[in-house]
Image (cartoon, rainbow, N blue to C red):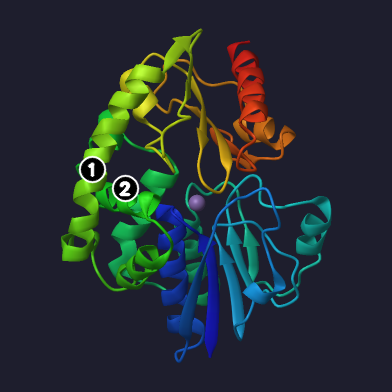
Amino acid sequence: MLTRVLYHDHCFDGAASAAYFSRFIAGAVHPDAEFRYTGMAHKASQLFEPSLFDGDENAIVDFKYSSDPKLTWWFDHHQSAFLNAADQEHFRQDTSGRKLYDPSYKSCTAFICRVGADRFGFRAPDLDDLVHWSLIIDGAQYPDARTAVELGAPAMKLTLVIEAAKGSGIVQKIIGWMQHRQLAEIIGEPEIQSLYAPLYQRHVELIDLIRGRARQDDGVVFFDLTGHDVEGYNKFIPYYLFPASTYTVSVSPSSFRTKISVGSNPWTPVEPKHNLASICERYGGGGHARVGAISLAPGELDEARKIAAEIVAELKT
Ligand SMILES: [Mn+2]
């Protein structure tokens, strides 16, 4: 019984969702399930080629809905979960009980855990710590910017490896380990250690780079990482550097897209008023109320800077 799992790649909650979902399927649905994983990234072109759905069961976790008839399971919690109105209508018409959506959840892993327990009687108490950290990381529930940026906990170290991984191979290895091992054990793997050490060095250098490029004005931090090969950065660095800021807008070009990231300070004394997913949706992006992103094609730097400037201006109001 081949189960294909499409998951949000390079994201702790995406990996944890794939791991928890696999335990759930093996434990409550198909004891003989064999899993194959496909990491999904938001990009400007078509997301779901029909050939992606090649399993007996085909699942998407922590990622957008697909109306492909071969999709059998879907779990998501993103505000922007549908590519278009037709997909949303397709979801509304679903009667399988296996396409599940609840944007009130702070992590998709916790959502799968809850649905598995309530509707299917499935429990995996050995994964409680995984669920707990998915809520902290995806929900940005850190007590302070230091916890988020200085990376003390095994889950934080693993997040660095997952977010910076080249390709999906190591993430899928981690998805396998997450199903049966504790996070501290996974971090102790020599392969993870050897990936982590240079990434941590780079993380420290990125803090310095952002410190040098970022400007704060009226509570909005802006920086442009053009010229640096940055596939991603810890999104709390701006609030570690500018604790009094409310929002961050950044432009970061990479090999496969030009990304505009929009975020809000989880520890700000001033409650953010703007819904960032709604702002990003206007430019073809999406996300959550407090963090969003827009992906343009590689090379669309001028357009990205124009959009970023418009969003900065809007967030200052
Ligand atoms: Mn998530």
The quarter of the picture where residue 79 lies is top right
**Does 53 appear above or below 141?**
below
The amino acid at mark 2 is Leu
In percent of width and height, residue 234 lies at: 37, 37
Judge left or right: residue 281 versus residue 103: right
Q: Residue at x 65, y 16 (%)?
A: 314
Label 1 CB, ligand 1: below 8 Å? no
Q: Earlier in the sequence, mark 1 or mark 2?
A: 2
Crowding near pointer 2: few (<14 within 10 Å), some, many (20+)?
A: many
In percent of width and height, residue 43 lies at: 62, 50
Residue 93 appears anywhere in the view: yes
Q: Circle 1 sits on which residue?
A: 200
Contact flag, marks 1 and 2 (Cβ < 8 Å): yes
Judge left or right: residue 303 versus residue 143: right
In percent of width and height, residue 49 lies at: 69, 68
Which disc, if any, is residue 160? 2
Foreground label between 1 and 2: 1
Q: Residue at x 31, y 47 (%)?
A: 160
Crowding near pointer 1: few (<14 within 10 Å), some, many (20+)?
A: some
**Does 70 appear above or below 268?**
below
Image quarter where the C terminus lies is: top right
Nearer to us in this view, 182 or 176: 176
